[in-house]
Amino acid sequence: MELIWSTVLTVWGWLLDHLLYINLAFSVIIIFFQRRDPRSVWTWLLALYFVPVFGIVFYLLFGQDMKKSRMFRVKEVSDRLNLPVKSQEDIIRSDDMPEEMMDPMSRDFKSLIIYNLETSGSVLTVNNQVQIYTDG
């Protein structure tokens, strides 16, 4: 029993000695590595620095989003949004472009079209009508 008590006191002393560094590490994690609302970031930072020991405990218990379903939901939405880009990129790379996309300009700028698809997800569209408004 005395060994356990001395171990707890040693760990507690180490935590108190290194509390500033622990809070600094959690602050960096909260600010730079988690996508949060700025209000919640400030709330957790205030909790860490004004209630140091309990702030760490509260952050570890309540500040972490333990739901993996959120991560998978974001992945599903991302995959659904990238489907047109991926399908058009496959068509252009396989040289089976439909007739409406076979104009000389599409063939001449094939590398640029693929570049736009890969970098920004810009899907090529053809036969667009543009109306210019000059009266604001």
Image: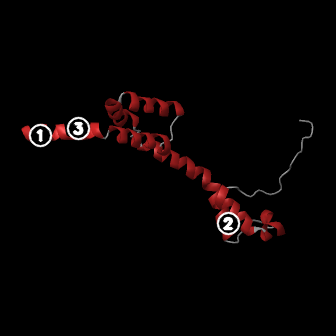
Mark 3 element type: helix
Mark with earlier residue (1, 3) = 1
Horizontally, is 100 left or right of 8 in the view? right
Task: Let me know if residue 97 appears in the view.
Answer: no
Considering every residue shown, the one lying at the far front of the view is: 17
Residue sitting at 37 percent across and 33 percent down? 62
Residue sitting at 43 percent across and 39 percent down? 27
Residue 92 placement: quadrant: bottom right
Task: Let me know if residue 119 appears in the view.
Answer: yes
**Residue hosting label 3:** 13
Mark with earlier residue (1, 2) = 1
Question: Residue 102: x and y, percent?
Answer: 79, 67
Rendered-image quadrant of the C terminus? top right
Name the mark on residue 91. Answer: 2
- Within-10-Å neighbours for mark 2: few <14, some 14–19, many 20+: few
Mark 1 element type: helix
Residue 119 placement: quadrant: bottom right
Name the mark on residue 4. Answer: 1
- Within-10-Å neighbours for mark 3: few <14, some 14–19, many 20+: few
Horizontally, is 112 left or right of 62 in the view? right
